[in-house]
Amino acid sequence: MNRPQLLAPAGNLRALETALRFGADAVYCGLQEFSLRASAHNLNQEELSRAAALCHKEGKCLYLTLNIFAFDSDLDRMVETARIARDLGVDAVIVSDLGAIARIAREVPGLSIHVSTQANITNTADAEVYRSLGASRVIVARELSLDAIKRMVTNLSGNMEVECFVHGAICMSFSGRCLLSRYLNGRSANRGACTQPCRWSYTLHEAKHPETVMPIIENEHGTAILSSGDLCMIEHIPELIASGVSCLKIEGRMKNELYVATVTRAYRAALDACFDHPEWKTMPEKLVREGMEELCTISHRSYDTGFFFGEPQAIVEDNITKQFREYMGYVLDVKDGKALVEMRNRFFQGEELEALTPSGIRPFPVENLVREATGESISVVNIPLDHVWIPSEGIGPGDLLRGPVRNRLNT
């Protein structure tokens, strides 16, 4: 039975540790340069070295994104960065630029190259060209159907692997090649600085009556005509396994640890269930429902299967972000029956929260709050990133606390 990797995102070192703890087989991250998520915290070289050590200690892989569209002034430094990454223990680099791929393959032997989805690989011939240049994996364009991906896997020669996205935000442009941010704000999405104008709400103004605002779709929240829904393929894990793809990728290097933990854990559970039941052709309804319930707790837009089974569904209502759980705290340490928690959002003594752990969701009553810095008992945690001690039961370092969303339109 084909056992694809589960590849999770990490915008920083804590997110990487979270991905590993919650079941990722591999993690991808970026440095400050050459990454299409320049606004993420990203890693420095020291953190990259530590990240590689953490992954390899767990028997997992680390991939580094070098996926901007490069100019001549970038290429020498990109190759040198790839060489440093190899020496630090990175397993592969994710690259979109044709020239950068050729040079890295030639000048940095021993480092695997994965071709980014930004390269718009839509057919087997594309993939074969990249294989001839030295790439070992292609991340196919998000516009491909599952049948097309299956044909590519079957038709590829040699040991070329195929990876596809299965969850996360989708760009309204073809595989993310967007000029809108550059045009409106002078910040290029193709250089990692996207301002996401496709997520803005727009209205119409008639030329002779500019003061008159006309909604494109009648709705109290405005409209988001350029904003796509989010990809979610958890219902179709058996079909993805049967397609022969080597890796299932989660989008989200701009997202926090709660997103990484929730999505990674949901897909890990779905994959493991399918591995235990290779006879399954479709996911059981109960497992789909449980997975979707968890995936709806995090920040998301309307979920859709993208192009996997034809055209994406039309967005007929406002596509605002929704979520049903708030990130309250990160468990730093557990000692003598108490957990040291770093606060993310305000919570109160006596409140009922949930602890998200790799083994499940645990109700967590908040009692006896004590500030670490002063040792004083408090009734509310409301200082950003403050450290507090609370009684712990059944939770460990790296678990996350979550609670109901407050002061939002969808509460």
Image (cartoon, rainbow, N blue to C red):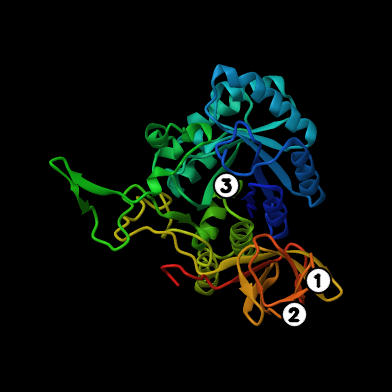
Residue 373, by quadrant, is bottom right
The label on residue 368 is: 2
Residue 245, numbered label: 3
Hey, which quadrant is residue 21 in on the image?
bottom right
Q: Nearer the viewer, residue 256 or 234?
A: 256
- Which circle marks residue 352 in the picture? none
Q: Residues within 10 Å of mark 2 (few under 14, many from 20)?
A: some
Residue 280 x, y percent position in the rendering: 55, 65
SS at mark 1 in the image? loop
Precedes in sequence: disc 1 or disc 2: 2
Farthest-out residue, right: 336
Residue 53 as seen in the image, left or right of residue 350 = right
| Label 2, label 3: how far apart the Cα atoms are | 49 Å
Relative to 12, say whether 113 is above or below.
above
Kindly tell me whether residue 400 is visible in this rendering. yes
Q: Residue furthest left?
A: 208
